Image: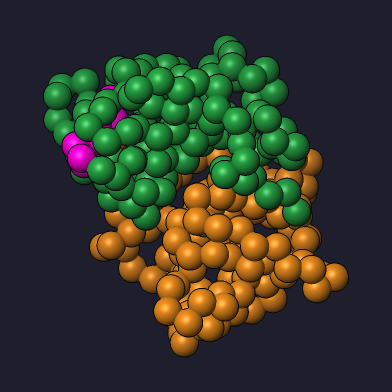
Chain colours: A green, B orange
Amino acid sequence: MHVFDRSTAHASLSNEAIEVIRWEQFQGTDRLPFHGMWYSVFPGQSSPRDQHPELELSLVLAGVAEVEAADGTITRVPSGSGFLLAGQESHIVHNSSPDTPVVVFSAYWMPEGHPDNAGVENGQGADQ
Amino acid sequence: MHVFDRSTAHASLSNEAIEVIRWEQFQGTDRLPFHGMWYSVFPGQSSPRDQHPELELSLVLAGVAEVEAADGTITRVPSGSGFLLAGQESHIVHNSSPDTPVVVFSAYWMPEGHPDNAGVENGQGADQ
């Protein structure tokens, strides 16, 4: 068994708005059919607008993610629930809480048939 | 965007020890390169011993999962962290808390090269 311990993992990006912890740092993640990462959106902050060819499944681990689509629609996804973004679907994650970080686990993978879909071993992919 | 709302999903199994909510009930999950489910282990309870050919990645959404391996070793995995089980790796999830359910999201998929690995559309797979 491999354990992926968020408390001891190192962040690849951290600023006043978000923190990103990529799973490539863990042994065993090369056996997953997707890339993995955790990201946090701090209280009162928003992620940068993001858009990428990979599909992305997000599970909300803490807080309430307010997911803004390209047309400005905002969908609230509470802790325990998930959301799936299609490839090239633009998104921003807002956190309107004054005190609770939003913490998300994301799995992301190239769509079948995409020219870059040569496995998930190249360490590139969805970015917050 | 597809939202997978745990609060309105229906359980495929529920007894005094565990509850299992499979993702096949949601539109859009046929686009995932894995099957998905949530399961809960209620306070003071344990899941049945489980063993299956699929690899299984679990994210702990609430509580502390105490994962028992085949040799009896128990690994504590707190909320926010994850664990990956190899195919055929026997496991039990215990919850020693007197009052907090353990809630887990699991992604599971057949290993590459397995004769049954003809995609994830057949609705069969890892069982708690």
Q: Position of residue B85 (x, y in %)?
A: 71, 54
- Does residue A32 sit above or below B80 in this rendering? above
The answer to whether one can see residue B50 in this image is no
- Location of residue A25 by image quarter: top right
Is residue A97 shown in magenta?
Answer: yes
Q: In this orientation, which residue lies closer to the viewer: B17 or A26?
A: A26
Quarter in which the N terminus of chain A is drawn: bottom right
Q: Residue at x 36, y 17 (%)?
A: A51
Q: Provide the residue span drawn in magenta.
A: A92-98
Q: Residue furthest right?
A: B71
Q: Is residue A99 left or right of residue B57?
A: left
Q: Position of residue B35 (x, y in %)?
A: 53, 51
Q: Is residue B10 left or right of residue A21?
A: left
- Location of residue B75 by image quarter: bottom right
- Location of residue B112 by image quarter: top right
Q: Residue furthest bottom?
A: B16
Q: In this orientation, which residue lies closer to the viewer: B80 or B16?
A: B80
Q: In this orientation, which residue lies closer to the viewer: B31 or B108?
A: B108
Quarter in which the C terminus of chain A is drawn: top left
Q: Residue furthest top?
A: A115
Is residue B9 shown in magenta?
Answer: no
Q: Residue at x 50, y 50 (%)?
A: B80
Q: Position of residue B91 (x, y in %)?
A: 71, 68
Q: Residue at x 46, y 23 (%)?
A: A14
